[in-house]
């Protein structure tokens, strides 16, 4: 049914580009991300640099924060429409609720 493809072939699935080696690259944001984003102080542009978070989800994070006050724990981000457990688990290492945003995308 399927022909064998080379190792460098890619498959586009939803919001991700999935390499045949199994690594996922977010459709939004850069391939390489280091640092953290303070979800209580970050701007839309800073939030949109997170893997799997584009401008629309970034704005929903800001809207939620404005309506409900600061996030008490990073897990509260899952209360934002469009950010479920799967997305949260993919970005949790880049999230903080204290300190400065140091996220760098390249």
Image (cartoon, grey):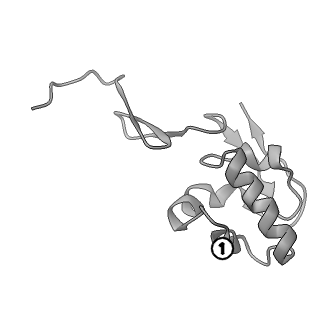
Q: In the image, residue 48 lies at what x, y percent? A: 73, 45
Against 101, residue 32 (above or below) is above
Q: Can residue 71 be seen in this view?
A: yes
Q: In the image, residue 51 lies at what x, y percent? A: 62, 46
Count of marks, rendered view: 1
Identified at 71% across, 70% down, the residue is: 74
Near-viewer residue (79 or 76): 79
Residue 77, image quadrant:
bottom right
* Direction left: furthest residue: 1
Read off the residue under disc 1.
79
Against 30, residue 98 (above or below) is below
State which quarter of the image contains the N terminus: top left
Q: In the image, residue 36 lies at what x, y percent? A: 77, 53
Crowding near the residue tagged with mark 1, few <14, some 14–19, many ≥20 C-alpha atoms within 10 Å: few
Q: In the image, residue 43 lies at what x, y percent? A: 86, 51
On the picture, is 86 further left or further right than 34?
A: left
Badge 1 element: helix
Against 53, residue 28 (above or below) is above
Q: Can residue 39 be seen in this view?
A: no
Identified at 36% across, 22% down, the residue is: 8
Near-viewer residue (34 or 62): 62
Residue 42, image quadrant:
bottom right
State which quarter of the image contains the C terminus: top right
């Amino acid at each position: 049914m399927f022909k064998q493809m080379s190792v460098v072939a890619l498959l586009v699935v939803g919001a991700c580009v999935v390499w045949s080696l199994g690594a996922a690259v977010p459709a939004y944001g850069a391939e390489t991300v280091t640092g953290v984003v303070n979800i209580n102080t970050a701007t839309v542009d800073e939030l949109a640099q997170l893997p799997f978070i584009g401008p629309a989800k970034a704005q929903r994070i800001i809207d939620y924060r404005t309506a409900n006050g600061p996030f008490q724990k990073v897990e509260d981000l899952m209360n934002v429409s469009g950010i479920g457990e799967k997305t949260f688990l993919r970005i949790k290492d880049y999230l903080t609720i204290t300190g400065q945003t140091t996220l760098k995308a390249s």
